[in-house]
Image (spheres, rainbow, N blue to C red):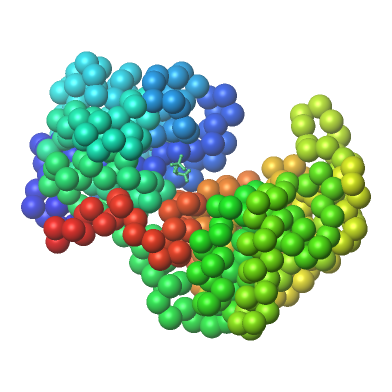
Amino acid sequence: MADLVAQGVAGKRVLVRSDLNVPLDGSTITDDGRIRASVPTIRTLAEAGARVVVTAHLGRPKGAPDPAYSLRPVAARLGELLGQEVAFAGDTVGESAHETVQALEDGQVAVLENVRFNAGETSKDDAERGAFADRLAALGDAFVSDGFGVVHRKQASVYDVAQRLPHALGGLVQAEVDVLRRLTEEPERPYVVVLGGSKVSDKLGVIDNLLGKADKLLIGGGMVFTFLKAQGYEVGKSLLEEDQVDVCREYLQRAAESGVQLILPTDVVVDTAFPSGDRTPEPRVVAASEIPSDALGLDIGPDSARAFAGALVGARTVFWNGPMGVFEVAAFADGTRAVAQALTEVTAEGGLSVVGGGDSAAAVRTLGFDEAAFGHISTGGGASLEYLEGKVLPGIQVLEDDE
Ligand code: 3PG
């Protein structure tokens, strides 16, 4: 982006694709990490005199306007963080967008309404996506790709628009890629990866890839129950992906053969129901091999939390993606807290600790950790996993194609 700024952006409309997909409770933003991470690029462009037009998505609306997914509260928060007024367009490429962009003066910023209110954004049909990208491109003179969390999506505002305007990689995407490269190109050893979150099917590619690269792989979160089932245990009412049990069994076998230490919890915290607002949790610790039929696992147990923390001592490189349990509820947050704490100790010892986006990034902030205690907190969950899988990320590839 430095080149673009050096060439002069004053008076130009610069379309910036940011990832402002933040968790909301009604219209209250519960974690503004992604908005804060997007500020430096927007500020740099505004200070250079650009008329900054921010485009982003929120959630997964069905290709049509839906007030529940409006970016209006996000635009307001962006204005607070930037310390300047941020205009908001009530549509993405329609009359409101054109009027709002036209009214911008040098150094001013506008946010367009949720780009996914338009079916063309996520269409699999190249022509439909292209037609929408044409309309988006009409709102800018140049394009900056700064939404790391979406670079793995071949979508109009990420991919196609870059083919239609002079473009540059934003500072956030560049910084993310620089750190993730340190995990894939000769990571300093021991290299430990901690995976959690609900679905094992989201993590198959990364596990497959890491079995040949990491020294230790620690697995917790909802996805662990499919592994426990593969070990021959009953998992009660816990999350289970039956169709992935055989794959998990194969991974256990491959880990044993390749010398990668694959560490699973030996105890879990269970309850008889998933936490809900009006019910007081009744947590119980049971052995991972003895989950009662009426119980569901909601966190790794205390012995496992200690073992996971112990496995991280002395690590020089750590990547963590996915909480160990339902950390939003205090009764099921201890496993996630123990892992986060262990990562801060890796950082304190001079190692590189990377928190891979999404829920784990939200978890470290919700649990009150100082962000500076981690080497890097990625803004991209799926994007960072796909990077580690070695996949081509369309939103980055499209910018490199003509360089
Ligand atoms: C994310 O939350 O990981 C990014 O914003 C991408 O969102 P998506 O998975 O809905 O494309």
Quadrant hosting residue 2: bottom left
Residue 164 drawn at (x, y percent): 14, 41
Picture layout, residue 213 above or below residue 285: below
Image side of residue 17 versus residue 131, left or right: right
**Residue 138 screen position, x and y as percent:** 14, 30
**Residue occupying the far top of the picture:** 95
Number of labels in the image equals 0
- Quick check: 245 left or right of 134? right
Let me know if residue 392 appears in the view: yes
The quadrant of the picture showing ligand 1 is: top left
Query: Which quarter of the figure is the C terminus placed in?
Result: bottom left
Q: Quadrant location of residue 56? A: top left
Q: Residue at x 44, y 58 (%)?
A: 386
Identify which residue, 53 or 227, lies in the foreground.
Answer: 227
Residue at the image point whose x is 53% and y is 71% from the top: 210
Residue at image position (49%, 81%) is 188
Q: Which residue shows up at 82% across the image and 52% down it?
A: 235
Q: Is residue 293 above or below residue 94?
A: below
Can you give x and y, in whole percent of width and height, for residue 87 in the image? 30, 25
Q: Quadrant of residue 35?
A: top left
Classify 386 as above or below 85. Answer: below
Position of the N terminus, as image quadrant, is bottom left
Q: Residue furthest left?
A: 7
Query: In the rendering, at what x and y percent does residue 162 appear?
Result: 20, 45
**170 sits left or right of 348 in the view:** left
Q: Is residue 107 visible?
A: no
For residue 34, above or below residue 83? below
